[in-house]
Image: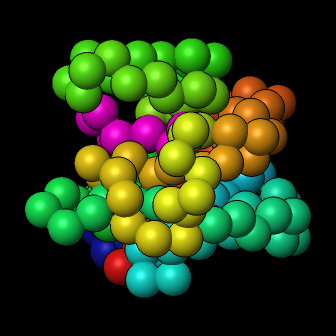
Amino acid sequence: MGDSMKMMRKTILGVFLAATAAIGSPAVGQAAALVANIDVATQTMTVRKHGKVIHTWKVSTARSGYITPPGEWRPYRMHRMWHSRKYDMAPMPFAVFYHGGYAVHGTTAESRLGTPASHGCVRLATVNAETFYSLVKELDPGNTRIVVTK
């Protein structure tokens, strides 16, 4: 096979692989319309819509003995009201699940916001959880990223 034919095959393969990666991995290379950055160190959640900060809220993440895992996810399930099967059917209003059993959701323990208090979920004031839930629903979970940093 000639050098020009080898070069053409490499180019075609490169274009194909790039296109496949872009189509198959929306989290890579494509900006999400809605990004929720949860900062465990400051116990805050900053919400950006199309790159512009629209909300900064106090949260509660994992208290001692539990973890809120760091990472980046897309929501995969949403419920206006969910009850934790693991923790005595505790109410989780406006739950946006993003990683296993971890969710961003409202809480009745609003006085604890700004301090670590959960079993690992990200707790918000219920009115803020409703706002976030509505934004995710409006912009689509596939266009939403939830980023947790330590």
State the residue at coordinates (66%, 48%).
Answer: 125
Residue 95: quarter of image: top right
State the residue at coordinates (20%, 24%).
Answer: 86
* Viewport quadrant of the N terminus: bottom left
Residue 66: quarter of image: bottom left
Up-down relation of residue 125 to residue 84 (above or below): below
Residue 79: tell me if it is visible: yes
Up-down relation of residue 92 to residue 81 (above or below): below
User: Residue 147: where, in percent of width, then height?
Assistant: 49, 63
- What secondary structure predominates along the stretch shown in magenta? strand
Is 101 colored magenta in this rendering? yes
Up-down relation of residue 56 to residue 143 (above or below): below
Residue 14: tell me if it is visible: no
User: Residue 37: where, in percent of width, then height?
Assistant: 58, 67
In the foreground, 126 or 95? 126
User: Residue 56: where, in percent of width, then height?
Assistant: 75, 69
Residue 5: quarter of image: bottom left
Per the rendered image, the range of residues in magenta is 99-105
State the residue at coordinates (31%, 60%).
Answer: 62
Is 46 colored magenta in this rendering? no
* Viewport quadrant of the C terminus: bottom left
Horizontal relation, residue 106 to residue 99: left or right: right
Horizontal relation, residue 56 to residue 60: left or right: right
In the foreground, 87 or 105? 87
Q: Hey, which residue is sitting farthest left in the picture?
A: 65
Q: Hey, which residue is sitting farthest front in the picture?
A: 111
Up-down relation of residue 124 to residue 139 (above or below): below
Count all numbered tags in the image, as a single digit: 0
